[in-house]
Image (cartoon, grey):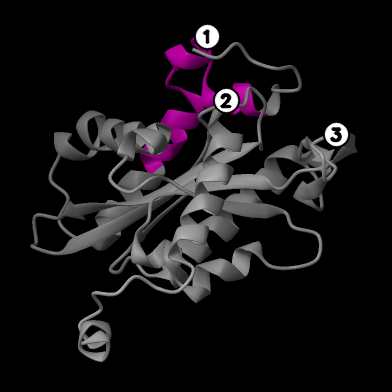
Amino acid sequence: MQRALRRCRLLLPQGYRADRKSWAMLRRKVFHDPPTRRNRVWQTDFSEFETSGGGIWRICAVIDYATKYCLAITVTPTARGADALACLRLAVAEAERILDVDDLRADRGLTEVLGPCGEMLGRAPAPIAVVSDNGPCFRGEVFKTAFAGPDLLLRHVRTRVRSPQTNSVIERFFGTLKYEHLFRGVIADGDALDMEVHRFRVIYNTIRPHQAIDDQVPSAAFTGCDQPRTAR
């Protein structure tokens, strides 16, 4: 019976409960006290779009949580781990470019280091938390390569299953992209879609004021976010 259930993928993997607990702890650390500085939490996801020619494309984006700055956006025919990883690497390169740093580790925050009894031993550099949903592309081995190495720049935090509100900033961005820009015209194919999403990214980052950051544009909030922002 066990072999039959395993062939049908109806058995939970070994260590499933421990894995769920570890992800729950990461989520609590990220969202218990929402960040008010840039490069503390990023959100990423895919969204589908069907062009008038009948093709279905996947839009991937990475958004900085505190400043709402869209660090990267891509259009691909698939939503695989390699596609998500490529977008994430573009986001790292964009953050380094706009901040004029060779290594983004120079702009990350600090976290408390606790002892075995819960006492604080000091503070250490904290990796940027990259929040995603539980899609297969974000659970695969390819995407995990972004979070490997002795001195981590990024750490992965997955949302609870069927909890899109946890990834609200990126979900809101996709809604704004579609209803304020893409749905207003006819987009024939993937090349036209790629051009339009990058055009909107420029508008979103540099022209469109954002109420959640005191009616600033995200580019100004991102480059000037040396002081903590008031969360809304």
Residue in the picture at 81% in, 66% down: 150
Q: Which mark is residue 214?
A: 1
Left or right? Give the position of 101 relative to 141: right
Check disc 3 and report its element: helix, strand or loop. loop
Q: Is residue 162 above or below residue 217?
A: below
* Residue at mark 2: 34
Mark 1–mark 3 distance (CA, rounded to whole Å): 37 Å
Image coords of residue 102 (percent x, y): 82, 52
Q: Residue at x 66, y 37 (%)?
A: 39
The span shown in magenta is 199-222
Asked if residue 56 lies left or right of residue 174, the reply is: left
> Which numbered disc flags the more N-terminal residue, 1 or 3?
3
The residue closer to the viewer here, 84 or 147, is 147
**Mark found first going from the N terminus, 1 or 2:** 2
**Residue type, label 2:** Pro
Identify residue type, mark 1: Asp
Q: Position of residue 38 (x, y in %)?
A: 66, 31
**Residue topped by disc 3:** 119
Kindly report which numbered mark, 1 or 3, lies closer to the viewer in this rendering: 3
